[in-house]
Image (cartoon, rainbow, N blue to C red):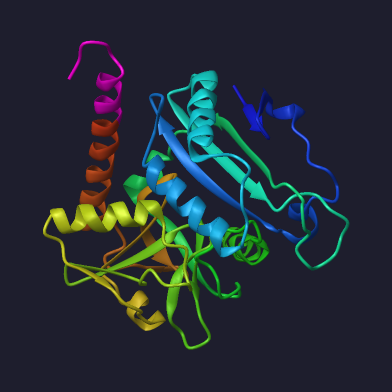
């Protein structure tokens, strides 16, 4: 079920190897992307691969493979996995060369994608809400590039786990809330969704863009502008999202209840719309794949 495509070859994930002096190992000189597939259909793959290309350009990195080849590899990996819920992970490294800070010349990039079953969501968390803590944002200034350099994220995530929370909501030195370690963050106040704008300080999630579009279709006001920790702590609702999280409600923050301490109506409605979008996408794609269907 866990299959790998690396530099043009398919194999079991357990057999995949990168050299010790790969730039990803030495410098985290690599980008990555995560896509979810349901019922054999990668969701929002175009948007994910668009972001992949933006991240690669941001690191002045080129893949030897075309987008068409990449898409074919992803679809074949999904087919090989054969599970109803799949996580698709891709990584592009600058390549393998003797350790030195300057970019090596004439070295081909290494690209790989793999798949594994995606666990079912913790329904209890969606019914009751998750706990979050706040934590300083200690990451670099180019968060819009989806780089594998994630140590600051890992440290903040571990801080959250050590304090009995699911995620950490990050904030800058002036107290501005940005996002989470592996998710975008949203505060709801007076019926309006607030989230940090799609600027270099955050990784603007593909699910984030879907949520904002669905919210506007629902007539829910959206404000993409910075807000403070005080604003976050006084919100009526909080929720977070990522490729594998569909508007997960947050009901406690730093050990204190958010709003009334229960899942709010807007997070619940957005979650329902995401689920409907995924169902419609898989149904439409499945029908398109059947001969003689419209």
Depicted 273 relative to depicted 3: above or below = below
Depicted 48 relative to depicted 158: above or below = above
Q: Is residue 270 visible?
A: yes
- Most distant residue in the right direction: 98
The mark tally for this picture is 0
Q: Write the residue at 39% across / 43% down.
A: 46
Depicted 78 relative to depicted 256: above or below = above
| Residue 142 vs residue 211, the one in the foreground | 142
Q: Is residue 270 left or right of residue 233?
A: left
| Residue 200 vs residue 83, the one in the foreground | 200
Q: Write the residue at 41% across / 40% down.
A: 45
Give how far across and how far down residue 20 sits, in percent: 86, 47
Q: Is residue 162 left or right of residue 293?
A: right
* Quarter of image, res 110: top right
| Residue 40 vs residue 91, the one in the foreground | 91
Q: Write the residue at 24% across / 27% down.
A: 284
Give how far across and how far down residue 5 sits, in percent: 63, 30
Location of the C terminus by quadrant is top left
Q: Write the residue at 73% across / 28% down.
A: 14
- Most distant residue in the top direction: 292
Q: Is residue 165 visible?
A: no
Residue 43 covered by magenta stretch: no
Depicted 251 relative to depicted 227: above or below = above
* Quarter of image, res 41: top left
Give how far across and how far down residue 220 sits, in percent: 15, 61
What is the span of residues highlighted in magenta in the rendered image?
Answer: 282-294
Give how far across and how far down residue 240 sits, in percent: 39, 58
Location of the N terminus by quadrant is top right
């Amino acid at each position: 079920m866990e299959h790998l495509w690396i530099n043009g070859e398919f194999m079991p994930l357990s057999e995949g190897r990168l050299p010790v002096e790969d730039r990803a190992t030495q410098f985290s000189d690599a980008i990555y992307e995560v896509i979810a597939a349901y019922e054999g259909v990668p969701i929002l793959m175009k948007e994910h691969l668009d972001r992949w290309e933006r991240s690669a350009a941001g690191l002045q990195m080129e893949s030897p493979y075309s987008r068409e080849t990449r898409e074919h590899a992803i679809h074949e990996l999904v087919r090989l996995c054969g599970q109803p819920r799949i996580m698709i992970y891709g990584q592009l490294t600058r390549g393998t060369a003797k350790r030195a800070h300057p970019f090596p010349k004439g070295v081909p990039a290494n690209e790989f994608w793999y798949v594994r079953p995606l666990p079912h969501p913790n329904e209890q968390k969606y019914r009751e809400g998750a706990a979050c803590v706040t934590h300083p944002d200690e990451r670099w200034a180019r968060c819009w590039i989806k780089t594998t350099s994630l140590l600051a994220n890992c440290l903040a995530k571990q801080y959250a786990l050590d304090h009995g929370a699911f995620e950490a909501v990050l904030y800058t030195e002036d107290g501005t809330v940005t996002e989470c370690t592996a998710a975008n963050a949203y505060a709801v106040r007076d019926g309006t969704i607030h989230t940090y704008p799609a600027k270099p300080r955050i990784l603007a999630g593909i699910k984030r863009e879907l949520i904002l579009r669905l919210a506007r279709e629902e007539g829910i006001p959206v404000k993409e502008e910075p807000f403070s920790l005080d604003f976050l702590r006084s919100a009526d609702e909080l929720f977070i999202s990522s490729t594998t999280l569909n508007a997960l409600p947050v009901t406690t923050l730093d050990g204190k209840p958010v709003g009334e301490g229960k899942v709010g109506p807007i997070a619940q409605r957005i979650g329902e719309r995401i689920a409907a979008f995924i169902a419609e996408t898989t149904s439409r794609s499945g029908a398109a794949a059947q001969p003689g269907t419209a």
